[in-house]
Image (tube, helix red, strand yellow):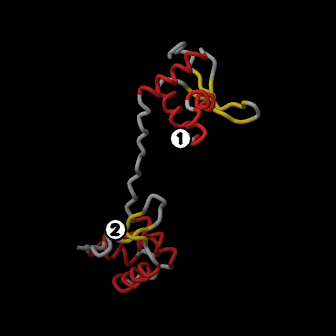
Amino acid sequence: MITEEIMYEIRESRGAHAVFLAAKHDSHLSGLFTTDIKGNLRYRGQRCTRKDLASILVYLQGQYRIQPSGFELESGLLAAAEGAPRRKREAKDPGPLVVSQIQGFLHEHGDSPVTSEEIGAAVFPDDFVEKRRSTEMMITSVLRGLGYQCVRTMVDCKRKYRWDLPADKPNGV
């Protein structure tokens, strides 16, 4: 139930702030608005349509006598909406065979810096042609796990990431 103090504050406020207060405190509106991962407004779990906004506007005008513009209405609702939880993608474990293959390549090349492209072309030639980006990401994950650090440099007139062991970890493979 909304208190007289909040009711007064909503009626005295203007624009997006009044919409925000109503969306947060009104029992008919609170908890109905969320945003998706891209930041789009959702009403009752569905994408908010113009019809939804119109019905909310009519409710606010009748209940609180506020008359926000379309932009103020949407801004106030977005500010009051609960954000969507971010999903963190977990990297797949490449497995001990993949790690040992990359370690073997690194052991053959000694202390010289390498690119994930060089490792991919030598160790996983088929995957590197068919699934280049995912193969490079897997190699990057393994190299980071082994303590390698990357530096973006120019190699053959192209910007590439070169991987090398930090100075405090010589022959860490």
Location of mark 2 (residue): 24
Between 116 and 105, the one lying in front of the other is 105
- Type of amino acid under label 2: Lys
Question: Of all residues shown, which one is farthest toward the right?
Answer: 157
* SS of the residue under disc 1: helix
Residue 45, position as x, y percentages in the image: 36, 68
Quadrant where the N terminus lies? bottom left
Residue at left offset 39%, top offset 65%: 80
Residue at the limit of the structure toward the front, as seen here = 126
Q: Which disc, if any, is residue 79?
A: none
Residue 33's x, y, as percent?
37, 68
**Residue 157 lies in what quarter of the image?**
top right
Q: Amino acid at mark 1?
A: Ser
Q: Which image quarter: residue 10? A: bottom left
Q: Earlier in the sequence, mark 1 or mark 2?
A: 2
Q: Tell whether 102 sits left or right of 61.
A: right
What crowding class fits label 2: few (fewer than 14 Cα within 10 Å), some (14-19), or many (20 or more)? Answer: many
Q: Are marks 1 and 2 in contact (CB under 8 Å)?
A: no
Q: Is residue 1 left or right of residue 166?
A: left
Above or below 112: residue 16: below
Query: How would you rate the neighbour count of disc 1 (Cα within 10 Å): few for under 14, some for 14-19, many for 20 or more?
Result: few
Task: Tell me if residue 103 comes above or below residue 20 in the rendering.
Answer: above
CA gap between label 1 and label 2 equals 43 Å
- Which one is nearer the viewer's eye here, 67 or 4? 67
Most distant residue in the top direction: 171
Question: Viewer-proximal residue, 173 or 49?
Answer: 173
Please give the name of the residue rendered at 66% of the width and 34% of the height, measured from the top-left corner.
Answer: 160
Secondary element under disc 2, as helix, strand or loop, is: helix
User: x, y (%) of residue 87?
Assistant: 40, 50
Task: Return the residue at label 1.
Answer: 134
Q: Which quarter of the picture shows residue 109?
A: top right
